[in-house]
């Protein structure tokens, strides 16, 4: 077992990837922003019509490609999300999955990403944002401790200047509402980690 497999196994134990993936509609055309080594991607790829994963960490995109090799509907690109969205991504995508990615991206860029997604996604559109919430405080600090070990001590993952940019779930909910989405917040706490999904829907009948 290599370091990548070990990292994946630990992340699989800590993150409710199946619950996040369950929010992706059958037949969706998905942009997976910061797909990493494909943990969440793997959990919904079979049901999606099309998946395009983007991540700037070459080591992780190589792992994701290996993991998702059998899926003809999946492509994985190595690159920066901001640049990809600014250039424009063709594919008629209607769903975005952003799992634990935004905390690696400076606040202003987060806003630009969400605004670009709002114009990029086809209707009915869905944005599924998984974050570590900033409350309760003690759980947030537990998560920060783990992230600091992974990013700063072991250097196993990349973020902007190896810093973190956390915002509360309510901020993302308000931002998605401002962009025209109907929002649902679902806490998915696991162990001492305050996982929360903010799901924005637009143009659905439900
Ligand atoms: C914590 S990992 C989450 C991976 C995966 N989404 C999951 O839930 O297992 C965050 C990922 O975001 C990627 N990332 C952060 N900022 C990025 C950016 N600006 N462009 C592309 N990828 C980025 C990192 O390389 C990392 O793989």
Image (spheres, rainbow, N blue to C red):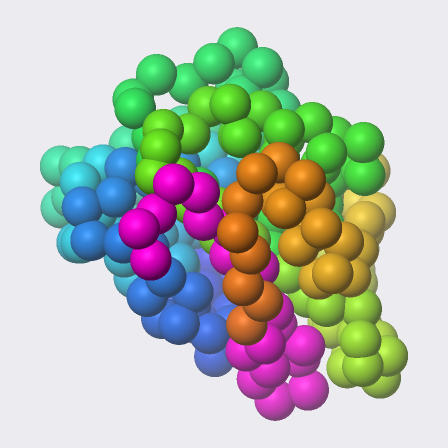
What residue is at 33 percent from the left and 58 percent from the top?
A: 206
- Residue ID at (50%, 39%): 33
Residue 51 vertical placement versus 172 (above, below): above
Where, by quadrant of the figure, is residue 12 drawn? bottom left
6 over 117 or under it: above or below: below
Q: Quadrant of residue 104?
A: top right
| Residue 192 visible in rendering | yes
55 displayed left or right of 95:
right
Residue 139: quadrant of the picture? bottom right
As drawn, the residue found furthest toward the bottom would be 191
Q: How many marks?
A: 0
Residue under the image location 61 percent in, 72 percent down? 195
Tell me, yes or no, whether the highlighted magenta stretch contains residue 65. no
Q: Nearer the viewer, residue 113 or 156?
A: 113
- On the question of residue 102 being in view, the answer is no
Q: Is residue 20 above or below residue 120?
A: below
Please state the horizontal and vertical placement of residue 57, each as a whole percent of the image: 55, 37
Looking at this view, is 203 or 114 the one in front? 203
Looking at the image, which is closer to me, 96 or 11?
A: 96
Identify the magenta region: 187-206
């Amino acid at each position: 077992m290599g370091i990548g497999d070990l990292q994946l196994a630990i992340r699989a134990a800590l993150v409710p990837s199946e619950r996040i993936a369950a929010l992706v509609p059958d037949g969706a055309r998905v942009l997976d922003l910061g797909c990493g080594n494909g943990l969440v991607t793997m959990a919904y790829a079979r049901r999606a019509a099309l998946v395009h994963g983007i991540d700037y960490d070459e080591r992780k995109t190589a792992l994701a490609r290996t993991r998702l090799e059998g899926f003809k509907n999946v492509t994985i690109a190595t690159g920066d999300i901001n640049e990809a969205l600014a250039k424009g991504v063709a594919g008629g995508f209607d769903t975005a999955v952003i799992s634990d990615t935004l905390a690696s991206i400076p606040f202003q860029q987060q806003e630009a990403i969400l605004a670009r997604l709002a114009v990029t996604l086809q209707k009915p559109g869905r944005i599924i944002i998984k974050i570590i919430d900033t409350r309760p405080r003690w759980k947030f600090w537990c998560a920060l401790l783990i992230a600091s070990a992974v990013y700063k001590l072991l250097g196993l993952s990349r973020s902007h200047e190896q810093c973190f940019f956390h915002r509360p779930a309510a901020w993302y909910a308000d931002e998605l509402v401002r962009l025209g989405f109907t929002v649902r917040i679902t806490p998915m706490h696991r162990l001492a980690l305050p996982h929360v999904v903010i799901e924005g829907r637009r143009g659905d009948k439900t």
